[in-house]
Amino acid sequence: MVGPVAVGGGAPVVVQTMTNPDTRDVAATLAQIEAVRLRGAELVRVAVPDARAARALFDIAPRSGLPVIADIHFDHRLALLAVEAGAAGLRLNPGNIGDPVKIRKVALAAAKAGAAVRVGVNSGSLDPAMLAKYGRGPEAMVASALREAALIEETGYANLKVSLKASDVGLTAAAARLWSQYSDIPQHLGITESGDSRSGSVRSAVGLGILLNEGLGDTVRVSLTGPPEDEVDCAWEILRSLELRSRGPNFISCPTCGRCEIDLPSLLADVKSRLADLAVPLTVAVMGCVVNGPGEAGAADLGVAGGRGGGRLFVRGSRPRALPYGELAAALESAARKMAGEREAAGAAAKGREGRGRPEGAARLKTPPG
Ligand code: SF4
C-alpha cells in the first residue's frame, strides 16, 4: 500500500507521476498535484533536495489530493523528515545513501509511520562496488536492489517496492525480468530520461508495453521532458492499449487523406480538450469521411463522421444526426457527458481490470545474482 492505494498482490497497475515545480513552492506543487490528479494520476512523487523542501512537505502532504512520495537522495535525514511530515512513501536511491545504519533508521521510521519505501535503482547512479563486481548491466542493478531490500527487510519492514530504471529499453527490460526471478517484491516500471513528448512516449510505450504484457510491473511512470500531465496521459494510453486499465475517453481518429473535407485535427484537439476531465471510459471516434467514418463512429460509444462542411454525429442508441462543422465538437461533448453521467449513475464508473499479482506466500528475496 502507498497511503490508501493498493500496490502489487493482484491490485491494478497504478499510474504515478512526479511534480516539477520547486517543492519549496508549496502552492505551485499543490496546484500541479491537483492537475495531475484530475488527469488520472494515482500517486505523485516530489523531489526533496534539501531540508527546506522536506519541511514544505508538512504543508503539502496533508493538503494533497494524492498520496505523496518523497524522492530522497544522499541524505537519510531528509527521509526521516519526510516521513514525519506525512509522506505516504519514500523513494530511496541505494547508490547514494549507502550507510546500512542510516538505511535501517529510515526503514524503522517508515514502518512506524506506515509509509511505503521504494528502492529506486537507476543505471546512471549505481553503487560503485556493484559496478566493479558486475559491470554496468542488469545484474548490477538487481544486485543493488536486492542488497538494499534485504537491509530494509531485516528490520521487519514489509511495505517495499523496487524500481530498476535505465534510459535504455533493453537494459530496463532485462533488469525487470531478472528481478522477477529473484524476488516477488512489487516493481515500479519506468524508462528514465527517455526524452521529450514524442521520443519519451514511444520509448516508454515500447519498454513498459513489453514488460506489462509479460505480467511485470505494479506501478508505472512515464518520464517525459515536459508537463507531468502528459506523462499521466501517456501512461493511461499504454495501460488502455494493453487493456489493463480503462479510464476516460479512448479516442479513435483517422489519419485523414484527400477525401477529408473538414479540419479534422482541429476538431479532434477541441473534442479532446473538452473531454479531458472525463474519468468514465468511453470510446469516441473522430473520423474524416464516409469511407470508414460511419463504421468506426457507429461501433464506438459516440463519434463523428466528417462530410462536406460538417458531419454526422453518432451516439450509441440514437439515429445519426447531421450537423455543421462548427457545432460538432459541442454536440459530441454534450452527448459524451450525458452518456458518462448515465454510466456513472448505473455504477459503471471507471474501474481498472483486475491486475495480475504475484503468487502470495512466495519467497520475497531469493539468492542474489552472481
Ligand atoms: S476515414 Fe476518410 S478521410 Fe479518414 S483516412 Fe479514411 S478515407 Fe481518409
Image (cartoon, helix red, strand yellow):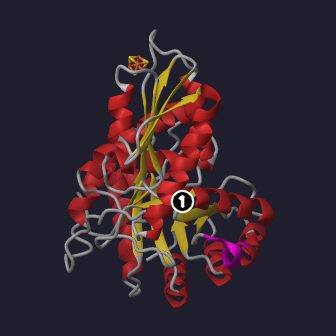
Decide which of 40, 57 is in the foreground and name it: 40
Quarter in which the C terminus is drawn: bottom left
Quadrant in which residue 329 is drawn: top right
Decide which of 172, 123 is in the foreground and name it: 172
Residue hosting label 1: 41
For residue 200, above or below residue 164: above
Predominant SS along the magenta part: helix
State the extent of the magenta-drawn residues as a range.
60-65
**Image spot of residue 162 (x, y percent):** 40, 64
Quarter of the rendered image showing ligand 1: top left
Find the residue positioned furthest to the top: 258
The mark total stands at 1
Decide which of 32, 121 is in the foreground and name it: 32
Quarter in which the N terminus is drawn: bottom left
**Image spot of residue 299 (x, y percent):** 32, 39
**Image spot of residue 145 (x, y percent):** 38, 63
Type of amino acid under label 1: Ala
Find the residue positioned furthest to the bottom: 112
Quadrant in which residue 349 is drawn: bottom left
For residue 161, above or below residue 227: below
Q: Residue at x 33, y 58 (%)?
A: 217
